[in-house]
């Protein structure tokens, strides 16, 4: 029996993964851990208004610094010629000027400018404190609006004694008085609020347009005449306690006068003015206490204030909206059955019924390398040509275009062909299984080892997505491919509660999570076992965040899995709600009220309530700076398992937040520790 010590897991960074060398030799090698550093992803493709060029962010990974890098590349649409946009340095958020002659972009907290005629080097046009974001050009191209955090005025603690000059006292205390005082990935929140600014597009002094102790959300949108800017904000007195309430505000560029455009219970955000200046599109939903509310597209006639819901008959959540150049309709992004899509909504005449959402592009995901989550990005030229990301299960996102009236996208880049064209990846197959609980159709995907033979018998890893309001799909996933390269069949599932199947499917778990997700997941496992190529003595289960919740729930209800890895979980809902970074949201929408009002429900839905049943060897894995599902959740489950003498280990990832895979070495370590734990509890040859 091979019992690989956990402390040796990092050897897997340089050695073949367990099982990778078994079976007949492959014509091309399988994906290996260090290959992760060679992967590239295309993101945020921006087509010029004249439709001739595309600038996009080409993300790669640096082996020495262990960081993601974003470089800007430009593509000539007609010829396909492809080159770096900048002479040196990184960049993000490229945005074309209205005349297609300049590109504004972000670098190190400032807005920079690149002139396409080559007459001038790229140069910063802001010199602000730090953190300029969401840049948007004015219609005339002479100004850029952006958002930036403004430090709050000190409230002062004059009675606190200060050290004498030259004295060496202990570090000063930190005083916290905000409801949301830390955010995952950002750390402890410094006092301040996000405000709207404008700056001349050739550089100069940035001017602040909004004031007050309120946060403003972007990106902003200019009115057609350049005299007004539209932005989303909650400017109510108790804004901290209304986590998803907001209105759209009109801000006068000269003077900064503000007025609310909407007065609607629920969030109104993502304002976009139509090119003709007549309409304002927003994405939001009606106020409700449901755990999941889908984004809906609404337009407002600016002259009259008339509001019209465009996607009322479309049972999918709208994530982003972009007007067509002729203002006759809107391109929208949404997820459908595990695939990220672009659709078209025509602006109807009069009081006609809600228009249909016409599918234009399917499969724009692939921007998340770790696990097969939804994602993708797009932009639209004046003639209706769409530049978008395009991903597949065997390739991360590339850049593609769909011309106006075209039938199929044209791929413009093949960023990973040099690497993945020389690797044998695991094949993928989609299945749909009726839930044993109520027959609800559950969609899932299988990824097979590169040397898979249906006559063989393979370990199976059930890998569970987080959220829980999220979805997996047939998208490239380095983690899943590495699991498969180690000789495992990998099963990932969209159980009830997942998005992309409509509001009712998502809200099957409203005030009931985790619940019948267990039946959905186990039903899919049993369906795969019935096909005859799974070694039922070697079933493993893992998942992160919401998937960590469900993994801990599963081992509390069954002992059929040989080992489990619970990553960044919620273990006790009461302690989670009172320590997570968005406690006001979770207590309000995921439960009928706070823990002290509903202690029985919080306990009944907590994996800790089932810990007395656990006998499965269970590892825990969490980032030490995770403020979404804090380390204290992991620690209490570890202590409970130890007290019960269940075999366990706790892996703490230094410096990592909830997104453990943000650094490529942590993605590799995560996979290595999971495989090491499963290998340790395997007696397969």
Image: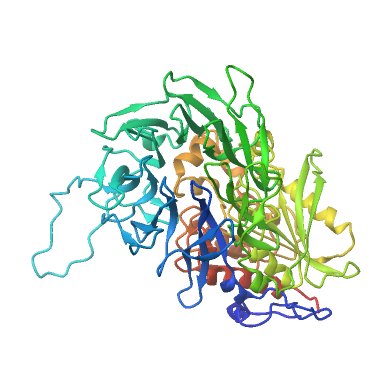
Query: Which residue is rendered at x = 70% and y = 42% of the image?
Result: 496
**Residue at 71% across, 55% down:** 474
> Furthest-left residue in view?
165
x, y percent for residue 100: 44, 50
For residue 409, above or below residue 248: below
- Please, is residue 579 above or below residue 678 in the view? above
Residue 680: x percent and y percent? 70, 75
Quarter holding residue 502: top right
Of residues 131 and 658, which is closer to you in this image?
131
Residue 291 visible? The answer is no
Q: Tell me where residue 369 sits by quadrant.
A: bottom right
Query: How many numbered circles does the render carry?
Result: 0
| Residue in the image at 42% along x and 25% along y | 262
Asked which colour scheme the image uses, the reply is rainbow
Residue 542 placement, left or right of 603: right
Residue 600: x and y in percent read: 58, 39
Residue 358 vs 17, above or below: the answer is above
Residue 344 found in image quarter:
top right
Would you place residue 261 above or below residue 420 in this image?
above
Left or right: residue 671 compared with residue 110? right
The quadrant of the picture occupied by the C terminus is: bottom right
The percent position of residue 492, horizontal first and vertical second, equals 72, 56
Q: Is residue 458 left or right of residue 344?
A: right
Give 639 or 502, whichever is nearer the viewer: 502
Quarter of the image that includes the N terminus: bottom right
Query: Image point 82% across, 69% down: which residue?
Result: 458
Let me know if residue 278 appears in the view.
yes
């Amino acid at each position: 029996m091979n019992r690989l010590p956990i402390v040796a897991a990092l050897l897997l960074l340089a050695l073949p993964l367990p099982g990778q060398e078994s079976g007949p030799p492959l014509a091309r090698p399988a994906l290996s851990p260090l290959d992760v550093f060679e992967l590239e992803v295309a993101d945020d493709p921006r087509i010029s208004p004249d439709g001739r060029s595309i600038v996009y962010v080409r993300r790669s990974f640096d082996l020495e610094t262990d960081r993601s890098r974003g470089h800007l590349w430009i593509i000539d649409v007609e010829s396909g010629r492809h080159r770096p946009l900048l002479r040196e340095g990184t960049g993000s958020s490229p945005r074309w000027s209205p005349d297609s002659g300049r590109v504004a972009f972000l670098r190190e907290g400032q807005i920079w400018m690149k002139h396409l005629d080559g007459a001038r080097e790229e140069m910063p046009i802001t010199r602000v404190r730090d953190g300029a974001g969401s840049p948007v050009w004015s219609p005339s191209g002479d100004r850029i609006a952006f958002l930036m955090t403004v430090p709050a005025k000190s409230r002062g603690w004059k009675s606190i004694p200060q050290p004498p000059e030259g004295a060496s006292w202990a570090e000063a205390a930190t005083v916290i008085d905000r409801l949301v005082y830390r955010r995952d990935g950002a750390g402890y929140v410094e006092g301040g609020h996000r405000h709207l600014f404008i700056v001349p597009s050739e550089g100069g002094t940035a001017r602040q347009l909004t004031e007050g102790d309120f946060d403003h959300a972007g990106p902003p949108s200019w009115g057609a005449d350049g005299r007004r800017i539209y932005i989303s904000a909650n400017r109510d007195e108790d804004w901290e306690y209304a986590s998803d309430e907001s209105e759209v505000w009109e801000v006068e560029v000269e003077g900064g006068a503000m007025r609310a455009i909407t007065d609607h219970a629920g969030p109104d955000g993502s304002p976009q003015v139509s090119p003709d200046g007549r309409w304002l599109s927003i994405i939001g939903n009606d106020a409700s206490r449901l755990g999941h509310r889908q984004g809906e597209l609404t337009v407002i006639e600016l002259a009259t204030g008339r509001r019209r819901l465009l996607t009322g008959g479309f049972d999918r959540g709208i994530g982003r909206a972009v007007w067509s150049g002729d203002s006759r309709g809107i391109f929208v992004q949404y997820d459908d059955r595990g695939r990220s899509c672009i659709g078209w909504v025509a602006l109807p005449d009069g009081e006609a019924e809600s228009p249909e959402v016409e599918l234009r592009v399917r499969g724009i995901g692939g921007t998340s390398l770790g696990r097969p989550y939804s994602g993708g990005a797009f932009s639209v030229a004046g003639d209706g040509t769409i530049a978008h990301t395009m991903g597949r299960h065997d390739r991360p996102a590339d850049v593609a275009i769909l011309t106006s009236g075209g039938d199929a996208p044209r791929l413009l880049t093949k960023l990973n062909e040099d690497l993945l064209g020389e690797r044998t990846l695991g094949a993928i197959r989609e299945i749909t299984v009726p839930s044993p609980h109520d027959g609800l159709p559950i969609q899932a995907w299988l990824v097979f080892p590169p040397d898979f033979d249906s006559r063989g018998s393979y370990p199976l890893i059930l890998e569970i997505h987080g959220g829980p309001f999220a979805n997996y799909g047939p998208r490239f996933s380095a983690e899943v491919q590495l699991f498969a390269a180690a000789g495992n069949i990998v099963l990932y599932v969209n159980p009830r509660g997942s998005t992309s199947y409509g509001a009712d499917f998502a809200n099957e778990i409203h005030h009931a999570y985790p619940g019948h997700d267990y039946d959905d997941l186990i039903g899919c496992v049993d369906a795969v076992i019935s096909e005859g190529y799974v070694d039922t003595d070697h079933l493993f289960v893992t998942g992160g965040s919401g998937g960590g919740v469900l993994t801990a729930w599963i081992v509390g209800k069954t002992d059929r899995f040989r080992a489990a890895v619970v990553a960044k979980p919620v273990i006790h809902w009461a302690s989670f709600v009172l320590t997570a970074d968005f406690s006001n949201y979770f207590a309000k929408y995921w439960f009928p009220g706070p823990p002290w009002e509903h202690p029985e429900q919080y306990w009944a839905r907590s994996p800790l309530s089932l810990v007395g049943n656990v006998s499965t060897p269970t590892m825990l894995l969490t980032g030490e700076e995770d403020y979404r599902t804090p380390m204290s959740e992991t620690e209490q489950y570890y202590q409970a398992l130890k007290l019960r003498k269940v075999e366990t280990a706790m892996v703490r990832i230094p410096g990592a937040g909830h997104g453990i895979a943000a650094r490529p070495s942590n993605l590799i370590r995560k996979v290595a520790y999971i495989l090491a734990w499963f290998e340790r509890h395997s007696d397969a040859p």
